[in-house]
């Protein structure tokens, strides 16, 4: 079936460290892939997305590349800041052939210390 | 500025009570969603609606129903609240499908059933 598996947290880093959060997926068809971020006390916001193989999504210094051969969409940032502390969710659309639903991973809590 | 508004941020209800969670979006979106978010489980889709009076079950519809009488409003109903429905509930909306459009989330409603 359709699923998203992402790295379990929590992840704790020092400011300016390199971040990787792994995400792999199973899906039918050709899904679009997303990373969402949830800051404390808020709803989810779209961080970045990629809609086809080899696309790279990027925003706020974060990047992720759609790798069809490895069914992965790993999130990376070269130098994290304290303000990046949040929960990060990987997701894909196209569950069961429909492009109207998202399937989410379980979320990864990131804490960045000064 | 786009907005998805959930009427109640924090609710405490008793077991067996009927609970209404209201969501309003001001973007004229056709598609609206209700998710619940639980630690270690991520977001799970309860119901979605792709038009007024239209609805489809998500992955965990048991114990819930929904109502969409107007395009801008999507209500989640717990007919008889139980303690295992204590959770954070997130409403979302999107115009069209996910490949070219952005889904917008409300800030969430924290429900505690005692």
Image (spheres, coloured by chain):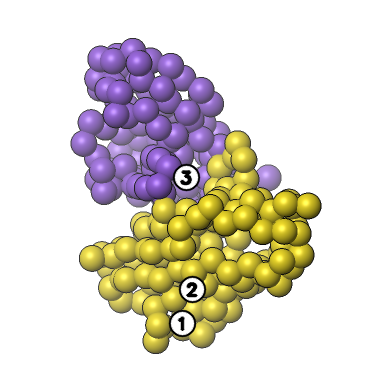
- In contact (CB < 8 Å): disc 3 and disc 2: no
Chain shaded yellow: A
User: Which element carries disc 2, helix, strand or loop?
Assistant: loop
User: Could you tell me which residue is drawn at 47 percent across and 47 percent down?
Assistant: B93
In front of the other: B60 or A80:
A80
In front: label 3 or label 2? 2
Q: Which residue is mark 3?
A: B92
Colour in which the image shows chain B: purple
Q: Marks 1 and 2: in contact by CB < 8 Å?
A: yes
**Label 3, label 2: how many angstroms apart (C-alpha)?**
23 Å
The picture places residue A80, in percent across and down from the top left corner, at 72, 62
Which is closer to the viewer, label 3 or label 1? Answer: 1
Mark 1 crowd level (few <14, some 14–19, many ≥20, 10 Å Cα): some
Residue A39 in the image, given as x and y percentages of width and height: 62, 45
x, y percentage for residue B36?
39, 40
Judging depth in this view, the residue of A99 and B11 nearest the camera is B11
Query: Circle 2 is placed at which residue position?
Result: A73
Residue behind mark 1: A67
């Amino acid at each position: 079936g359709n699923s998203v598996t992402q790295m379990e947290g929590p992840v704790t880093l020092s400011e300016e460290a390199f971040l990787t959060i792994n995400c792999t997926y199973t899906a039918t068809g050709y899904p679009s892939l997303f990373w969402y971020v949830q800051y404390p006390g808020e709803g989810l916001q779209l961080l970045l997305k990629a809609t086809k193989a080899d696309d790279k999504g990027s925003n706020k210094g974060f990047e992720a590349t759609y790798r069809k051969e490895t069914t992965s969409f790993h999130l990376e940032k070269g130098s994290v800041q304290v303000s990046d502390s949040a929960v990060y969710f990987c997701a894909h659309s196209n569950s069961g052939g429909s492009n109207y639903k998202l399937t989410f991973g379980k979320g990864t809590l990131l804490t960045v210390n000064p | 500025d786009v907005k998805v508004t959930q009427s109640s941020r924090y609710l405490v209800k008793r077991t067996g009570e009927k609970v209404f969670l209201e969501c309003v979006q001001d973007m004229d979106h056709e598609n609206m969603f209700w998710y619940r978010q639980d630690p270690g489980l991520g977001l799970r889709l309860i119901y979605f609606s792709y038009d007024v009076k239209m609805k489809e079950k998500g992955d965990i519809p048991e114990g819930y129903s929904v109502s969409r009488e107007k395009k801008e409003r999507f209500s989640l109903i717990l007919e008889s609240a139980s303690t295992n429905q204590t959770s954070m509930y997130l409403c979302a909306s999107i115009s069209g499908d996910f490949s070219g459009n952005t889904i917008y989330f409300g800030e969430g409603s924290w429900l505690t059933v005692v």
